[in-house]
């Protein structure tokens, strides 16, 4: 594809997400929290709630109506496991598609369905390489905020691989009337973690004690524990991988580490309560902005574009922070998880 075609694909993903956001807002305003939080089904990837089904239906309808027929695409998304492949134009054999689009219709369902905190719609587009298609093949990514009922603004960030910080498109959308304004993307330039946010994901009871031990060990090794009158490092358990990437992009957080797959393997849990490729499909945007995303062994992050592979990852606002924490965290991972 040409640069112009990649840019067109970026615009399409943003239009898709605008459509899904607006559909969710309309349904949210008509239904109660109890209705939206009803369990619709349980899949190999996650529990699917009624609010998830609204977004899935909106996605399928949009692709059927607006995706270019000359760019046949396979959709890979949470909630669409099993059954026939989702391809557009509808019925196109997967072997004849040009692209694979991985989607998370709502990343952060649990917070949004109780109207507590924004969720995010995530999308990454890669050339179709069949089962060999991976996160590292994604060329275009977009993420759009799905706001709570009291919010008038929803942010949207998108880009094409290789665009760099200046090429990212970031906008704040007024969901009341559709107006847009430029949003500044600038990950933190801090050189340490003092008086800043840096977190290890431990959203649910499973594995929490082990993950907390690693977290305590990290900050003890860097700064010592109990040596300050007030907390030195803050944490934020945002139950949304896309939301975590956003917090790094916008400059709120300095580090996020999600080591749940390692912890679960250590304690013998077989759980879907981990990050999957669709959750982390927009990590490219953080790297384009100058941040760092890596695997726990400090290698580049990569995984198949599917809905079930567990993904452990660490994101940093900048290289200096990555080099500060990386070696210490790698040692602690070997100590606690291997």
Image: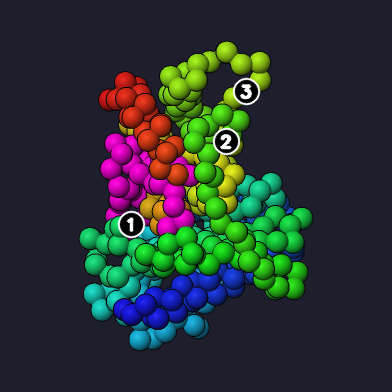
Q: Secondary structure at mark 2?
A: strand
| Position in image of residue 75 (x %, y %) | 39, 68
Say how many tags the image has: 3
Going by the image, does 319 lie left or right of 12? left
78 or 169, nearer to the observer = 169
Question: Label 2 belongs to which residue?
Answer: 197
Q: Secondary structure at mark 1?
A: helix
User: Residue 231's mark?
Assistant: 3
Question: Label 1 belongs to which residue?
Answer: 135
Residues marked 3 and 2 touching at CB (< 8 Å): no
| Position in image of residue 173 (x %, y %) | 67, 67
User: First in sequence: mark 2 or mark 1?
Assistant: 1
Residue lying furthest top: 227
Magenta highlight on residue 312: yes
Q: Magenta stretch? A: 288-317
| Position in image of residue 328 (x %, y %) | 37, 26
- Please name the residue shown 57% across and 13% down the image: 227
Cα–Cα gap, marks 2 and 1: 27 Å
Residue lying furthest bottom: 70
Cα–Cα gap, marks 3 and 1: 36 Å
153 or 159, nearer to the observer = 159
Q: Main secondary structure of the magenta part?
A: loop
Splitting the image into 4 quarters, where does residue 83 fall? Answer: bottom left
Magenta highlight on residue 272: no
- Nearer mark to the viewer, of 3 and 1: 3
Splitting the image into 4 quarters, where does residue 154 fall? Answer: bottom right
For mark 2, does the 10 Å Cα neighbourhood hold few (<14), some (14 to 19), or many (20 or more) residues?
some
Going by the image, does 175 lie left or right of 168? right
For mark 1, does the 10 Å Cα neighbourhood hold few (<14), some (14 to 19), or many (20 or more) residues?
many
Q: Is residue 312 visible?
A: yes
User: First in sequence: mark 3 or mark 1?
Assistant: 1
Cα–Cα gap, marks 3 and 2: 11 Å
């Amino acid at each position: 594809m040409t640069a112009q075609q990649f840019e067109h694909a970026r615009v399409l993903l943003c239009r898709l997400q605008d459509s899904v956001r607006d559909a969710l807002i309309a349904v949210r305003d008509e239904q109660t929290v109890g209705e939206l939080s009803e369990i619709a089904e349980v899949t190999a990837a996650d529990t699917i709630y009624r609010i998830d089904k609204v977004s899935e239906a909106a996605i399928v309808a949009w692709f059927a109506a607006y995706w270019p027929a000359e760019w046949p695409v396979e959709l890979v998304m949470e909630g669409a496991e099993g059954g026939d492949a989702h391809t557009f134009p509808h019925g196109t054999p997967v072997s004849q598609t040009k692209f694979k689009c991985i989607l998370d219709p709502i990343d952060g369902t649990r917070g949004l369905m109780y109207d507590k905190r924004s969720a995010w719609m995530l999308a990454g587009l890669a050339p179709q390489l069949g089962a060999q298609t991976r996160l590292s093949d994604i060329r275009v990514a977009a993420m759009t905020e799905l706001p709570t009922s009291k919010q008038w603004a929803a942010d949207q960030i998108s880009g094409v691989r290789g665009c760099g910080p200046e090429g990212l498109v970031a906008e704040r959308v007024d969901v009341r009337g559709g107006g847009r304004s430029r949003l500044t993307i600038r990950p933190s330039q801090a050189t340490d973690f003092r008086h800043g946010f840096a977190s290890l994901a431990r959203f649910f009871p499973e594995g929490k004690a082990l993950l907390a031990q690693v977290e305590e060990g990290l900050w003890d090794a860097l700064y010592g524990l109990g040596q300050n009158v007030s907390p030195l490092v803050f944490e934020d358990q945002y139950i949304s991988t896309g939301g975590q990437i956003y917090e790094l992009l916008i400059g709120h957080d300095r580090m996020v580490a999600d080591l749940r797959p390692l912890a679960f393997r250590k304690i013998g849990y077989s759980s879907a309560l981990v990050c999957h490729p669709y959750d982390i499909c927009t990590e490219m945007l953080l790297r384009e902005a100058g941040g760092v995303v890596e695997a726990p062994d400090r290698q580049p992050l990569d995984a198949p574009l599917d809905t079930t592979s567990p993904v452990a990852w660490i994101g940093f606002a900048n290289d200096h922070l990555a080099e500060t924490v990386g070696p210490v965290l790698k040692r602690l991972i070997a100590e606690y998880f291997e």
